[in-house]
């Protein structure tokens, strides 16, 4: 079986594992890593080897762009100081803590120890956010964890680039020089992302074809990353994240029409799933080849080093969360505003959500095999093993226990508050449409009978939304009433669909006509929600 055939097989296996994870209500990245691990040890199946630069260039730009697109700049700004402290402060705390243990206990040289620390410092929120969505944790927790991961990838990889240069002998470490390089690379990435967003996004209105718009929506993040990383030598990750945030904010006015927007969101949903599925299953498949290069270490030594490294990564995060936030009076004076103030349950959940993922593995795989003078880089294989061990431990151990921890702590969002907020927004939209309808009828002199149908439609919606708000959100009575209404609407649409299919079957209309009508019915049914 060649590499292409193996890749297709892995994608099929990833889809089946994701479905199994959905049935068992387990975050699918965990199943994908474990499934990839099992496939890696299965006899007769070749390991798919993907160059790490391919992971960075092919996988990361669309994933990071989507993460920025679906994030709220307002929410990120509201928690900017907390996110910044985690994405910068906690990254450096983790780097130094891991480096110290790796040097004094594991025996790595200082440069290689710092490389390992930089690799393990960024978090991957995919599994955590899947759990958050299902269990409905407070929005602040999800915003901080997601926002941290958006920025700390760039922070950690800038530090990683500097550490690798020192370890490979292509750079000389200088605290002042390293600090300046960090500011230039990270700040340059943000500036490049903003400039490209201001330059590119106004041109979207010129693209009228849905296929062309969707194609460019995929290609542009790659262009942003390559321009920033390869041409300007600043952080491509922060450039793409910044561009994604700007694109997501302006998205309601970017696409040519509603059909294009629906197609684009559906396409991106499939694309992100495919990329994440492949990435996590490939991640799990790498362990056998990594272990094969560690003959000089015993199993007990490897297990000890892995446990120690994981303990330091988790311990540094717990220590940071249970010390720094309680210094909020200091930060209040320093920043002249309120620092994030949560409670110990939120801090514990956010600490336990610090899982590692594909960015760490991709960084580890890019560590050079030889130094600048041609000598082998010591302990590269051990760095790879420890990276994979920490990724596996955080994803599996923390990912599987995070739902239990959230339930035990009783950390749940007030669902009614979110529901009332949504109903209020829908109510304001329906009232605005009704006002516009009155102006349209007045300006065009439409007869009352033509206005009546649309007026009744919006008045019915307004009545339902007001009833929901008065009921206090999703009460049992209102929930049952809404469910009944959705059921009746679906039955009516199904009756229309069945009639159209019968006409197609007897030749009264063409399949193309049926598909056009069916698309409209599908769009109408999708609006019912539930």
Image (cartoon, rainbow, N blue to C red):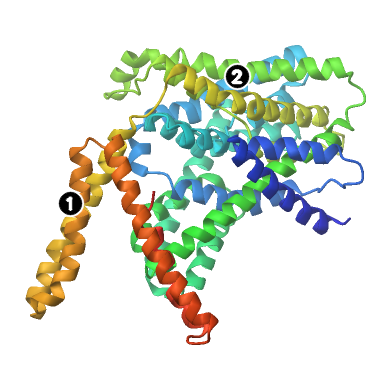
Q: Secondary structure at mark 2?
A: helix
Q: Residue 36, image x and y in percent? A: 76, 40
Q: Residue 50, image x and y in percent? A: 77, 49
Left or right of residue 270, residue 435 in this image = left
Mark 2, mark 1: which one is toward the viewer?
Answer: 1
Q: Which residue is mark 2?
A: 314
Q: Is any part of residue 28 visible from this angle?
A: no
Left or right of residue 462, residue 505 in this image = right
- Compared with residue 210, is residue 164 higher up or lower down, i.e. above or below? above
Q: Secondary structure at mark 1?
A: helix
Left or right of residue 480, residue 384 in this image = right
**Which quarter of the rendered picture does the N terminus lie within?**
bottom right
What is the spatial separation of the Cα atoms under label 2 and label 1, in whole angstroms? Answer: 51 Å
Q: Residue 334, image x and y in percent? A: 32, 20
The image quadrant of residue 366 is: top right
Q: Which residue is mark 1?
A: 463
Q: Is any part of residue 383 visible from this angle?
A: yes
Q: Residue at (32%, 41%) from the top-left corner? A: 479
The image quadrant of residue 447 is: bottom left
Q: Residue at (72%, 52%) from the top-left corner? A: 11
Q: Residue at (34%, 59%) from the top-left corner? A: 489
141 or 478: which is nearer to us?
A: 478
The answer to whether the residues at label 2 and label 1 have Cβ atoms under 8 Å apart is: no
Q: Residue at (55%, 46%) from the top-left corner? A: 237
């Amino acid at each position: 079986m060649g590499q292409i055939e193996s890749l297709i097989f892995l994608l099929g296996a990833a889809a089946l594992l994701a479905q199994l994870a959905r049935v068992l209500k387990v975050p699918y990245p965990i199943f994908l890593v474990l499934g990839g691990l099992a496939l890696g040890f299965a006899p007769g199946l070749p390991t798919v080897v993907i160059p790490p630069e391919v992971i960075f260039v092919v996988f990361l730009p669309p994933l990071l762009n989507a993460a920025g697109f679906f994030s709220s700049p307002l929410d990120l700004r509201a928690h900017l100081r907390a996110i910044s402290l985690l994405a910068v402060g906690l990254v450096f705390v983790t780097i130094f803590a891991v480096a110290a243990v790796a040097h004094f206990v594991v025996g790595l040289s200082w440069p290689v120890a710092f490389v390992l620390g930089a690799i393990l410092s960024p978090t991957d929120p995919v599994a955590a956010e899947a759990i958050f969505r299902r269990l409905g944790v407070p929005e602040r927790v999800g915003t901080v964890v997601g926002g941290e991961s958006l920025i700390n990838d760039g922070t950690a990889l800038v530090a990683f680039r500097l550490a690798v240069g020192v370890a490979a002998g292509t750079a000389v470490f200088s605290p002042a020089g390293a600090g300046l390089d960090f500011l230039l690379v990270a700040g340059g990435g943000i500036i490049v992302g903003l400039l490209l967003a201001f330059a590119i996004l106004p041109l979207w209105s010129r693209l009228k074809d849905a296929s062309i718009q969707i194609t460019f929506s995929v290609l542009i993040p790659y262009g942003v990353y390559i321009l920033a990383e390869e041409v300007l030598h600043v952080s491509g990750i922060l450039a793409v994240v910044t561009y994604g945030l700007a694109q997501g904010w302006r998205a309601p006015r970017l696409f040519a029409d509603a059909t294009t927007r629906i197609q684009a969101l559906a396409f991106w949903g499939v694309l992100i799933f495919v990329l994440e599925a492949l990435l996590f299953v490939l991640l799990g498949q790498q362990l056998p080849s990594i272990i094969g290069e560690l003959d000089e270490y015993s199993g007990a030594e490897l297990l000890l080093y892995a446990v120690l490294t994981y303990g330091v990564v988790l311990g540094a995060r717990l220590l940071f969360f249970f010390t720094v936030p309680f210094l909020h009076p200091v930060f209040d004076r320093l920043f002249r505003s309120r620092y994030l103030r949560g409670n110990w349950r939120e801090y514990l959940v956010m600490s336990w959500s610090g899982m590692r993922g594909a960015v760490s593995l991709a960084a580890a795989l890019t560590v050079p095999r030889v130094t600048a003078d041609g000598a082998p880089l010591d302990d590269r294989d051990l760095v790879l093993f420890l990276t994979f061990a920490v990724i596996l431990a955080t994803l599996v151990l923390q990912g599987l226990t995070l739902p239990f921890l959230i339930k035990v702590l009783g950390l749940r969002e007030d669902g009614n508050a979110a529901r009332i907020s949504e109903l209020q927004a829908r109510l304001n939209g329906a009232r605005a449409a009704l006002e516009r309808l009155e102006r349209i009828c007045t300006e065009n002199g439409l007869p009352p009978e033509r206005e009546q149908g649309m007026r009744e439609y919006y008045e019915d919606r307004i009545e339902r939304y007001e009833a929901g708000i008065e009921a206090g959100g999703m009460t049992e009575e209102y929930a049952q009433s809404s469910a009944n209404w959705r059921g009746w609407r679906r039955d009516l649409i199904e009756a229309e669909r069945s009639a159209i299919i019968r006409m197609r079957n007897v030749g009264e209309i063409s399949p193309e006509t049926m598909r056009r009508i069916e698309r409209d019915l599908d769009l109408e049914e999708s609006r019912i929600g539930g």
